[in-house]
Image: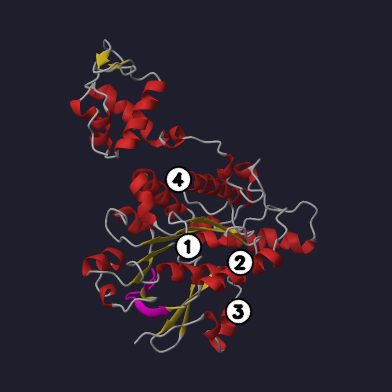
Amino acid sequence: MKCRIRPRRWSGSAACSWSASTKPLLAALGRDITGTPHYANIAKMPHALVAGATGSGKSVAIHALVTSLLYRNGPNQLRFIMIDPKRVELTAYNGIPHLLTPVITDPKKTIFSLKWAAKEMERRYNILEAEKVRDIESYHSTIFEPAKKSGAEEMPEALPYIVIVIDELADIMHSYPRELEASIVRLAQMSRAVGIHLILSTQRPSVNVITGLIKANVPTRMALQVASQIDSRTILDGAGAETLLGAGDMLYLSSDMQKPVRIQTAFISEGEVKKVVNYIKSHNAGDLSSIDFGGNGAGAEPNDVIGLTSGSFDDDDIDDDLYEEARIAVEEAGRASTSYLQRKLKIGYSRAARLMDVLEAHGVIGPADGSKPREILTRSGAAPAVADTDADEETASF
């Protein structure tokens, strides 16, 4: 039997303990079949995967998590990077001071934002090492808060928690599979101690989207209704999600649980989200003077710390990760065609064609000359080789 649960129904002693809790990343999940409220500390998750079929309630569950975090934290304590390729869900939060950059809708900018997060992670590790503390909780309790209470003239840098929310993983995985997987895995493996957390969502729970590496490093799973038992096993490593009722009915599994718990997530309407956003915009601008993100955000606009709106990047920067592999591949094989790079690197046509342009710009291969083979210019210890044009260079499948 379906039951609509709203956040205002979280009342009683459990809700009081939630409101009084000092855990900044304690988020409301919903109620179980007995009506008991359930909460989760994102700092302990430390990363979550939300998956389910279209209309199962994924986006509503994410809104419930986000709004409960906004309820507990101002922009000095918590910042968001929100990624919404669908352009219609998370864009409602544009304008709140918690955002490090306007909601990202472009897959290319998604990769840059995750690379920025990795650099910020390294910078924070350097700070923790210099202060001789283990994690961000210790930093706040032993370094930042005492300095704040004593009114120190030189305040240590505030390190707000950063939550990265991706509303549809599949769309970005289609465009940049290798970069996205590598960035997510790197952050998932190391970012917990410095207060950076991931909430990933997808409506396509296939092994091409939720890869083995991503599953291994994202321990908390929220499985909403899916079409088949295979999809349920992809998310939870077990059956059950295919029998859910939809509309926010989910199975919640964290790293410290043996079996998933069935929870009805809270329903929050579009109008309620807008009211929350408008209230925050008008009442909680926040004093962000103590948050500068070091050189990692230097020169950026106040509402765009990452600097994605400046346009100071291009496609070649994204291809840096594959450039060396492509260069070695063409030099060793003595062939350089778009279709060859597609097969060798397991990438799409547009990526392979762009890599060919980068290789030519860096002087690794010669320019195209009609139907003539391309010349390999940097093959060491041998005369210049000619590249195999592969007749399918011009007819490679997109």
For the N terminus, the image quarter is: bottom left
**Dot placed on the residue nearer the N-terminal end, 4 or 2:** 4
How far apart are the two marked residues, 3 and 2, measured between alpha carbons? 20 Å
Q: Which residue is mark 1?
A: 89
Q: Which residue is mark 3?
A: 19
Q: Which residue is mark 4?
A: 111
**Dot placed on the residue nearer the N-terminal end, 1 or 3:** 3
Front label number (4 vs 2) = 2
Q: Is residue 361 left or right of residue 227?
A: right
How far apart are the two marked residues, 1 and 2, measured between alpha carbons? 13 Å
Q: Residue at x 66, y 40 (%)?
A: 299
- List x then y, in percent, for residue 147: 74, 59
Up-down: is 13 above or below 60? below
For the C terminus, the image quarter is: top left
Callout 4–callout 2 Cβ contact below 8 Å: no
Callout 1–callout 3 Cβ contact below 8 Å: no
Up-down: is 137 above or below 320? below
